[in-house]
Image (cartoon, grey):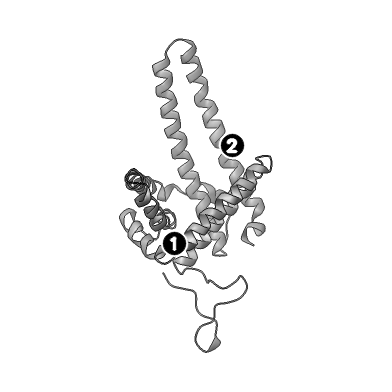
Amino acid sequence: QLWQQHLGLLLGATVTVVAISYIVAFLIAIPQIALQQNGEAELAQAINIAGQILNNLLQLYLGAGQTQMAIKMARREPVQYTDLFGGGSVFLPLIGAYILAAIAIGIGFVLLIVPGILLLLMWWPYYFLIVDKKAGIIESFSTAATFTKGNWGTTILLWLLSIGIMILGFLALCIGVLFAAPLVTLLWVVAYLMMSGQISQQPYGQPQLGQYGQAAPPPKW
């Protein structure tokens, strides 16, 4: 329902992120090709690596903005296109947490793969906790583990569902990915908010009932 309600805004944000990525890649490719033609292959390779790092950081920044937009949608808060560029305040903590998670999960996959999978199942909400400004770098991992405890089956189902949605998007002449990607983002955002008790688990439009059948107050963080 959220995806349908905000489809235009979600599509606009997704197209913007993809367009910026291609523009940056194109601008980096120009000097790289020129250097290669002049026989300066090592410098061209250095520019290529620097460009990839820059593009990844830019995608991380814009991804934070996209996620903040989805969180606002799920909470029924006002959201606008400019929120896409509002991830600056969480950018540095996100980089730190991302590096720590990548190292730990990478080591886990080296150790017979299973530990890496377990860390993925346990820690995935860390990203949303930081983007949502609910936890610091270290705290985000321990808090994430409390949310996912008992929810590993749901997490696996979400992964499978996300893969299936993205495959359908690619099959639709690849253009469908522009519609599928924001739907997947909303799926994970809603799962994060439900597991953390920030939104009701009742269907949309049906208030969660508290004591004596009265509508329960919004969950407190």
For the residues marked 2 and 1, what is the alpha-carbon distance in whole angstroms?
35 Å
| Residue at the image position 39 percent from the left and 23 percent from the top | 46
The residue carrying pointer 1 sits among few (fewer than 14), some (14 to 19) or many (20 or more) residues within 10 Å by Cα, namely: some
Residue 93 visible in image: no
Q: Amino acid at mark 1?
A: Trp
Give the residue pinned by disc 2.
19
Residue 59 at x, y = what percent? 48, 41
Residue at point 36%, 61% (across, down): 145
Residue 54 position within the rendered picture, expressed as x and y whole percent measured from the top left: 44, 34
Neighbour class for label 2 at 10 Å: few (<14), some, many (≥20)?
few
Q: Which mark is residue 46?
A: none
> Which residue sits furthest top?
38
Secondary structure beneath disc 1? helix
Residue pointed to by mark 1: 152
- The total number of labels drawn is 2
Give the residue drawn at x 37%, y 45%.
95
Element under label 2?
helix
Q: Nearer the viewer, mark 2 or mark 1?
A: 1
Q: Is residue 219 above or below residue 79?
A: below
Front residue of 31 and 82? 31
Q: Which x, y percent locates residue 124?
A: 42, 55
**Is 15 situated above or below 72?**
above
Q: Mark 2 or 1 closer to N-term?
A: 2
Q: Pick the quarter of the image with the N terminus.
A: bottom right
Badge 2 amino acid: Ala
